[in-house]
Image (tube, grey):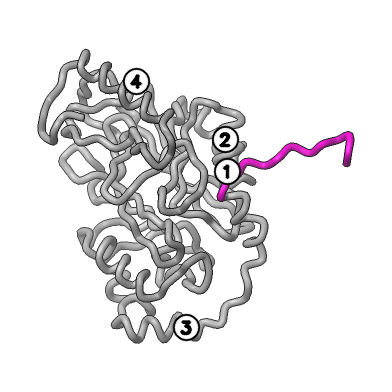
Amino acid sequence: MPPPGMRVSAIQFSRLHVTIAARLNAPRQSRRSYLVQSLPFSSLNYRGMSSIAEGTPRLLFRQLFEKDSSTYTYLLADLAHPEKPAVLVDPVDKTVDRDLNLIKELGLKLIYAVNTHVHADHVTGTGLIKSKMSAVKSVISEASKAKADLFVHDGDKIYVGNLFLEVRHTPGHTQGCVTYVTGEGPSQPNPRMAFTGDALLIRGCGRTDFQGGSAEQLYKSVHSQIFTLPKDTLLYPAHDYKGHTVTTVEEELLYNPRLSKDVETFKDIMEKLGLAYPKMIDIAVPANMVCGIQEPVNVASA
């Protein structure tokens, strides 16, 4: 991999792509996702990762809702790129057809289906998406220990055309939680956008009493990885149960009834929540550990 700051030609990029693709076939523990690049953003482009990027991205953004689990799925695409590459964040199995129909209507090319963590309240749609669109790559953090095509780590970048998402490790709700943040720079969305999963909700946060959760760890994650973003950064959670759609870093610093407190008060609040056992956890977690792939029913034995 060329050192940071080094520009490469289209031919060099082609060779780099071959090298990266080969690494995808290596054992999981020995590879790093090819989403990760140490090259300057201006020299990267989606098109087999073999050409020099030109032009300024134009963001298409959609916030989609699944009512049974109150889950938000997010669609982002670069409309300025010739192929209109797109990414889905936190797709749900029940709304896969809706999402793929929208992508088709808008003339987009879905490249990635990414998850913020292993969800306990719904089955991810990544498995169904891959069964319908085999070229799409599923993405999750390696810390989640779930199956996926590609694994990301703190500081990695996911490129979608000339747009990119920065990966920030935000454990505490689960050990594998990450937040995806739009890039920083004149060609990236302004204000920035962060897709926080269950780590940070609007005026709340995810629970910390299962899946290796830790209130202290969640507090540190949010304060170090999310609350350090510019105050006007738009925060989009994986869920909302009161009809809210978006918040900002500044709002949550001021008004979040849990995370605006000191760490000891936060830990006490979380310990006393007394939440019920998640009704979908015994179905959702095992399914999501294998990318949401559901075994077909054997009609002969049914």
| Residue 255 falls inside the magenta stretch | no
Label 1 SS: loop
* Extent of the magenta region: 289-302
CA separation in Å, label 4 and label 2:
21 Å
Is 294 on the left or on the right of 17, as rendered? right
Please name the residue that numbered disc 2 is placed on: 129
CA separation in Å, label 3 and label 1:
32 Å
Q: Amino acid at mark 1?
A: Gly
**Quadrant of the image occupied by residue 157:** top left
Query: In which quadrant of the rendered image does the C terminus lie?
Result: top right
Of the numbered discs 3 and 1, the one sitting upstream in the chain is: 1
Is 205 on the left or on the right of 3, as rendered? right
Label 3 SS: helix
Where residue 152 appears, x then y in whole percent?
Answer: 36, 44
Please name the residue that numbered disc 1 is placed on: 125
Disc 3 or disc 1, which is closer to the eye?
3
Q: Amino acid at mark 4?
A: Gly
Question: Which secondary structure type mostly characterizes the magenta part of the structure?
Answer: loop
Q: Residue at x 62, y 41 (%)?
A: 293
CA separation in Å, label 3 and label 4:
48 Å
Residue 81 in sight from this viewpoint: no
Q: Amino acid at mark 2?
A: Ile
Mark 1 touches mark 2? (CB < 8 Å): yes
Mark 3 touches mark 1? (CB < 8 Å): no
Where residue 242 appears, x then y in whole percent?
Answer: 51, 68
Q: In the rendered image of this protein, does residue 143 appear above or below residue 104?
A: below
Label 2 SS: helix
Task: Please name whichever residue, 182 or 268, is drawn nearer the observer in this view of the structure.
Answer: 268
Please name the residue that numbered disc 4 is placed on: 48
**Quadrant of the image occupied by residue 10:** top left
Please name the residue that numbered disc 3 is placed on: 271
